[in-house]
Amino acid sequence: GTVSLLQAFQYSCNTAFAQLVTQKLGDDPVDEFAKAAAQFGLDSKPSGIPLQVSTSTVVEIGDDDLAMLAQSSIGQRDVKLTVLQNAMIAAAVANGGVRMRPYLVDKLQTADLRTVSSTSPSAVNRPLTPDQAATLTDMMIRSEQETAGAQSGIASKTGTAERGEAGASTYAWYIGFSPSSNARIAVAVVVENGSGGANSYGGVVAAPIGREVMNAYTGGAR
């Protein structure tokens, strides 16, 4: 049958996204996919963090390798994302489509708590228009409601990336935020080697952790 984009997003319908990226991205879908990934910070090291941070990457895809493109579009193949990168993606959606530069130190203070210097938040770019961010937020709210243990007041997306070995534990993902006019927190969680093995799904293993973090910050459900 046919599903809408909302249904595909809600239920993580991989075949729908594979079809979308290989058939609906114009004459050069590989280039369009790479440009979109770059807009969200993939293939460039995050700046402003005084720590070693791995670069999130999408391995170069052959111009006519639509199978590799389809696999990459659902986070499989050679796609590699850090937890920081996925948190920044969630934060960009929450921030109306503006991607912010991450930083580690908010401010420096003396022993008597006098502020010596503080970090001013700064934008990197705008990968989404406000309307696109609002649409994606609505889709993430609907996705949360189709996830095990769903909680109101959260916009989220789960992910379950298979590993190469048969029966191996998955990479279980969950990203989310509490949508509001003054959203203050976005989270990303990845669980490796979950006790459920190949059944360690993002919505089952990673989602409860993400909700607990957001609830601890916002004072939400306990």
Image (tube, rainbow, N blue to C red):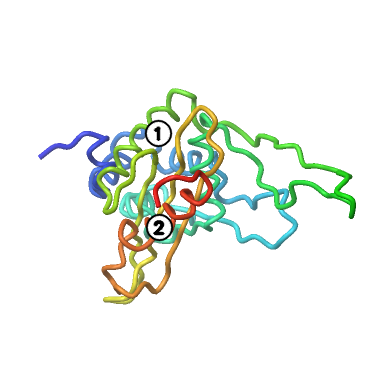
In this view, the residue farthest toward the left is 1
Location of mark 2 (residue): 173
User: What crowding class fits label 1: few (fewer than 14 Cα within 10 Å), some (14-19), or many (20 or more)?
Assistant: many
Q: Which mark is residue 76?
A: none
For residue 73, above or below residue 204 = above
**Image location (x, y in percent) of residue 195:** 33, 75
Rendering quarter of residue 190: bottom left
The quarter of the image holding the N terminus is top left
Count of labels in the image: 2
Residue nearer the viewer, 161 or 21? 161
| Amino acid type of the residue tagged 1 in the rendering | Thr
| Amino acid type of the residue tagged 2 in the rendering | Trp
Q: Residue at x 39, y 41 (%)?
A: 154
Rendering quarter of residue 205: bottom left
**Image location (x, y in percent) of residue 88:** 55, 45
Cα distance in 3D space between marks 2 and 1: 18 Å
Q: Which mark is residue 137?
A: 1
**Image location (x, y in percent) of residue 32:** 44, 38
Residue nearer the viewer, 138 or 34? 138
Pointers 2 and 1 in contact (C-beta within 8 Å): no
Q: Residue at x 42, y 59 (%)?
A: 209
For residue 161, above or below residue 25 = below
**Image location (x, y in percent) of residue 50:** 75, 57
Rendering quarter of residue 5: top left
